[in-house]
Amino acid sequence: MNITEFFEQSAGKWFSQRTSHHLAFKQAESGKSDIRIEMIDKDDPEVVKLCEQYEMDPALALCGARVTWDGTMEWDEEKHSGTAVLVPIADENNPNQGKLLRDMGYAEKAPVAGRYVMGDDGALTLITEYDTMYSEERLWFASPNLRLRSSILKRFGGFSMATFCSEIRMGGAK
């Protein structure tokens, strides 16, 4: 599987349940989200704009996806929602890895370019280094309608967090 196929397989509506373990506080919390993943054309204005923002040739975009989420966490009443556009750009010599452009990061609410690695096992690993933290996330399919995700988040000079998610497709598959 390549990254475009992974994004295509991810398209649809998902219900996500997650458990996060805050290592510094020795506490865990659970959360849930509704996630929608839509494929967008490589020549869509949002994809072109994002490539230009990172000074990348839009013709190098492999695909585009819009991810929208709406969720809650156990510890707070605050709604956690947002939308991000994702655009993978393969390395010149290795199509199984490259840059992943985002108009909004997950750990920090700012545009960020991370890296992706598509494993031989069909798992996608996303690595993002922000100004104050490092994030590594691994996503894979247990079946066509069950996607699993594990991640670590390390704040430089501070806390770390590990998360596991199970995501069940609720509709919208091709």
Image: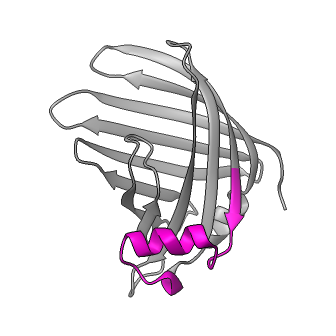
Query: Could you tell me which quadrant the C terminus lies in?
Result: bottom right
Q: Nearer the viewer, residue 4 or 150?
A: 4
Which residue is located at x 63 percent, y 39 percent? Answer: 69
Identify the coloring: one colour
Q: Quadrant of the N terminus?
A: bottom right
Q: Quadrant of residue 5?
A: bottom right
Please provide percent x and percent y for residue 10: 69, 56
Where is residue 132? Give x, y as percent: 22, 41
User: Left or right: where does residue 30 sit relative to residue 134?
Assistant: right
Image coords of residue 19 (percent x, y)? 53, 25
Instruction: Let me know if residue 97 appears in the view.
Output: no
Is residue 40 highlighted in magenta?
A: yes
Residue at x 64% of width, y 33% of height: 70
78 lies above or below 118: above
Residue 134 % position (x, y): 29, 45
| Frontmost residue, 71 versus 156 | 71
Region of the chain picked out in magenta, as a range? 37-60
Residue drawn at x 71%, y 47% as measured from the top left? 36
The one nearer the camera, 99 or 48, is 48
Q: Residue at x 43, y 75 (%)?
A: 52
